Image: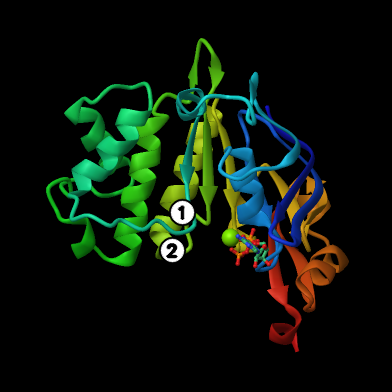
Amino acid sequence: MLTAETLTVRLGAHEILQAVDFTAHAGEVTAIVGPNGSGKTTLLRALTGDVAFTGAARIGALDVARAKPWELASRRGVLAQFTGVAFPFTVAEIVRLGQASGTAGAATDLTEQALARVGLAGFAPRRYHDLSGGEQQRVQLARVLAQVWEPLDESGPRWLVLDEPVASLDIAHQIEVMELARAFARAGGGVVAVMHDLNLTAMFADAVALMARGRVVTQGPVTAVFRDSTLSDAYGCKLRVNVAPPSSTFILPHAALT
Ligand SMILES: Nc1ncnc2c1ncn2[C@@H]1O[C@H](COP(=O)(O)OP(=O)(O)OP(=O)(O)O)[C@@H](O)[C@H]1O
Ligand SMILES: [Mg+2]
């Protein structure tokens, strides 16, 4: 389990997260949704030990505030919302950065497997900066995968912590990445993913936490959280939740219905 208890983050004069409780279970894809500025990235950064907080955050048996960097690196890989790369690295070198901080070793075939997993077979020798935005995002995902390659080991589940993993991807690669996340979870790992696409979330998430104004408003199964009034209040626009037979939930903005 990955948990936050009364987690509060202050940055400068602002309280960015206010006593947030959050739980994600191994074996599931847990999505975090909510409007811009609601605190999703800040919650991920606290859960992964990248920003100071009060309250508690745990990844399995690890107390995030006390864990050593290598202990955290062995249990969770983090895809940031934005990743700057300052040096002229090749694609393979980026993926090996992930491998080096994980436990799977530096085997070349793992680099290739991780790239193939995100649809980038053959890209290893290319210059990272020559790739398109979506390709770069998938290289970063390959780096994270190479870090936490085995979803489960004798110490328990590993975690993929993904901040908007499909934000710059075309629809086929969005589905590929969400299927990859689901497969990681079904193999015993855990996935926490910040999402803006509510329909993709409805399709792939087992559980969802809805954030607004620095708080988790509600958390649970998609059908419990995705209600007209709950979503409309959080996002500040009229949204309607629909169900297509047999049970596919989809969300449309009100304007599209009139
Ligand atoms: N270092 C900082 N100093 C001051 N305010 C910050 C800092 N980092 C984030 N914030 C503020 O905290 C709030 C939450 O930011 P956060 O990045 O967590 O939002 P988010 O939900 O991930 O939004 P988005 O969907 O746009 O990525 C925002 O209002 C942001 O301006
Ligand atoms: Mg964000």
**Residue holding disc 1:** 175
- Secondary structure, mark 1, is helix
- Secondary structure, mark 2, is helix
Residue 36 appears in which quarter of the rendering?
A: bottom right
Residue 102 appears in which quarter of the rendering?
A: top left
Disc 2: CA contacts within 10 A as few (<14), some (14-19) or many (>=20): few
Residue 171, disc: 2
Residue at the image point whose x is 85% and y is 63% from the top: 230
Q: Residue furthest left?
A: 125
Q: Is residue 76 above or below residue 30?
A: above
State the image coordinates of residue 107 (x, y, percent, origin top left): 21, 25
- The tally of labels here is 2
CA separation, marks 2 and 1?
6 Å
State the image coordinates of residue 135 (x, y, percent, origin top left): 30, 59
State which quarter of the image contains the C terminus. bottom right
Residue at the image point whose x is 37% and y is 56% from the top: 137
Whether residue 190 is visible: yes
State the image coordinates of residue 49 (x, y, percent, origin top left): 58, 38
State which quarter of the image contains the N terminus. top right
Q: Is residue 148 above or below residue 129?
A: above
